[in-house]
Image (cartoon, grey):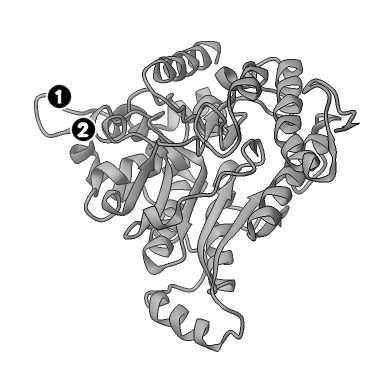
Amino acid sequence: MALVLLFILGTIRALYSSSPVVAASSSQVRATRRPLSAEQQQQQQPEIFSFDPGSLDPIEQSKPRMEALMNRTMSLGPKISDWDSRRSSRRRKIKQCEKRMMLVTSSHPKPCENPLGDHIMLKSAKNKMDYCRLHGIDMFYNVAKLERSLPGFWIKIPLLRAVMLSHPEFEWILWMDGDALFTDMTFRIPIRKYEGYNLVMNGWDHLVYGNRSWTGLNMGIFLIRNCQWSLDLLDILAQMGSDGPGSVGIGKILHVTLFGRPDLESDDQGALLWLMNAQRERWGAKIFLEHSYALSGFWVPLVRELEDKMRRFEPGLGDDRWPFVTHFAGCEFCEGWANYSPQDCRRQMERAFNFGDNQVLEMYGFRHPSLNVADVDRT
């Protein structure tokens, strides 16, 4: 386990050193599913994972086996194939004007194991509510597990589908992990930039399609359009993520074909990266890999320099000078384990929260005198 974690962290640090804005999601830095047990490894079939390096591309070679392992009986609900026309019809019947965006996030249905976890999640929710209020964005906060056969971070898949079908008036859904905070309250997502695309996430083309790097994109924060293409993608991801014998085999395929991915069961980020390379025209062509601003800024290099950013820059930039979103990947605030020091995670999360909170409090004549304290003073 330690070797796996060190390898992943090393990969992310290498990525940071060569990229202007860091993408690092919870599924990258830590595994919601732990590494495979000895029993699971014994159940694996060697022929699934042996590729001929002198023959076809590994992803091409893996396609037949991936197809066999996907759980085609997995269903998120009744099959829908005409959502674009149905959504258009339903929107005409809705009296209010079309809304551009809804933020969707989720947390554990039960109390956190960490005694401070629920308080941290409350602050995370408050941060998201502030940003949504300032920018006219609706918010849906979920604490229910909607699909038992999809564990861990896969919970976003059925949730997003349910929100899309229930709210045809929203063109875009912004998914945001609970361990991510808005740290630029002024920055507006350049939504017009994504005309012709259905999915927007932090990432780089050369890492996704060239290196096929597991850390080349981010599934912790992303924009997804409410359309038939998105429903189809969610259906396929659910078939790749459902619990069962195939999940182990799929995880092994992802481990072999994607650079830097540890030997775990299937994960949503690896599954999407595999699909983007295996069927680039169908999926990759509609995915915008954003790196001109911090759609998911990795917390480690950012939060220790917040005071310097406050002295040198102003909010509204959105990039690493004043990051739009700071993502605490590798910090587990609710469960009892993490890749980083729990004390450092809590302290830096508090600082990032206060950094964003100051931008709100100043509208009312208050601010935190220091990013290290919850106290406030009049300005």
Q: In the rendered image, is residue 150 in sight?
A: no
- Mark 2 element type: helix
Vertical order, 307 against 183 (above or below): above
The residue closer to the viewer here, 189 or 53, is: 189
| Horizontal arrangement in the rendering, residue 139 relative to residue 241 (left or right) | right
Labels 1 and 2 touching (C-beta < 8 A): yes
First along the sequence among labels 1 and 2: 1
| Horizontal arrangement in the rendering, residue 225 relative to residue 342 (left or right) | left
Vertical order, 29 against 119 (above or below): above
| Horizontal arrangement in the rendering, residue 54 relative to residue 283 (left or right) | left
- Residue 149 rendering spot, x and y as whole percentages: 57, 52
- Residue 314 rendering spot, x and y as whole percentages: 60, 32
Q: Which residue corresponds to the image point at 61% horizontal and 81% vertical from the top-left?
A: 96
| Horizontal arrangement in the rendering, residue 241 relative to residue 162 (left or right) | left
Residue type, numbered disc 1: Pro
Measure the alpha-carbon separation of dots 1 and 2. 7 Å
- Residue 254 rendering spot, x and y as whole percentages: 36, 34
| Residue holding disc 1 | 53
The residue closer to the viewer here, 40 or 11, is: 11
Q: Which residue corresponds to the image point at 56% horizontal and 39% vertical from the top-left?
A: 316
The residue closer to the viewer here, 240 or 376, is: 376
Q: Which residue corresponds to the image point at 47% horizontal and 35% vertical from the top-left?
A: 265
- Mark 1 element type: loop
- Residue 177 circle label: none
Q: Quadrant of residue 338?
A: top right
Q: Quadrant of the C terminus?
A: top right
| Residue holding disc 2 | 58
Residue type, numbered disc 2: Pro
